[in-house]
Amino acid sequence: MFRFMIITIPLLVGACSPLNIYHQTGVSVTQLRTDETSCDVRALRDAPVANQIRRTPARYIPPRQFCDSDGNCYSRGGFWEPGEIYTVDVNQDLRRRVKDQCMMGKGYRAVSIPPCPQAVADAAPSAVTGTLPRLTETSCVIRNRDRSWQIVNQG
């Protein structure tokens, strides 16, 4: 049962979140993926991964005095805790901007499509979006169990 919960929780969280994609009415999802891959490669070429190792500042823990119920006290001296080591890709934001520019150059725009209300999801026939439809103010997305999605224009 515990294994089932670990697997289903990410699926449920994903079902409630908006779909953030690049959109161009009439383009096939296959072409969208091809264009995204092309732009990912260009962005990686133009703004390669540039990891830097960094460390958070060290922290001094001051001395403390401890006493038991009999009034016997002792002190523990102060000490330094070293900072945590972490890695940062300093080109990550630049790479995202290069990809965005590339996709806009191909005629796409970044959109965020909200999840469909449960009543709409229940009423819609099960399908997968193959061609990006014209988006309206009532457009919403249904996420399928296989991680595919269906864009629905309500009303």
Image (cartoon, grey):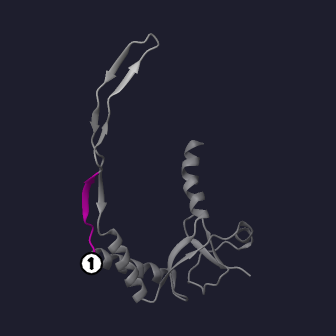
Q: Which residue is mark 1?
A: 46
Q: Is residue 2 above or below residue 152?
A: above
Residue 69, can we see it?
Answer: yes
Q: Is residue 72 above or below residue 62?
A: above
Residue at position x 26%, y 54% in the image = 54
Res 145 seen here = no
| In the rendered image, the vertical position of residue 73 relative to residue 32, given as above or below | above
The N terminus appears in which quarter of the rendering?
top right
Q: In the image, is 97 to the left or to the right of 113?
A: left
| Along the viewing direction, whichever of 80 and 20 lies nearer the viewer | 80
Is residue 51 shown left or right of residue 122? left
- Residue 24 image point, x, y percent: 51, 86
Q: Residue furthest front?
A: 71
Rendered-image quadrant of the C terminus: bottom right
In depth, the one of 9 and 34 nearer the eye is 9
Q: Is 50 included in the stretch rendered in magenta?
A: yes
Q: Quadrant of residue 10?
A: bottom right
Q: Is residue 125 left or right of residue 55?
A: right
Q: Viewer-proximal residue, 1 or 21?
A: 21
Query: Which residue appears farthest toward the top when viewing the image?
Result: 70
The residue at the point 28 percent across, 27 percent down is 77
Residue 130 % position (x, y): 56, 80
**What's the residue at 29%, 56% (across, down)?**
87
Which amino acid is tagged 1? Asp
Residue at (47% x, 86% y) in the render? 108
Residue 137 in picture, x, y percent from top left: 65, 82
User: Pointer 1: residues within 10 angstroms few (<14), some, or many (20+)?
Assistant: some
The span shown in magenta is 46-55
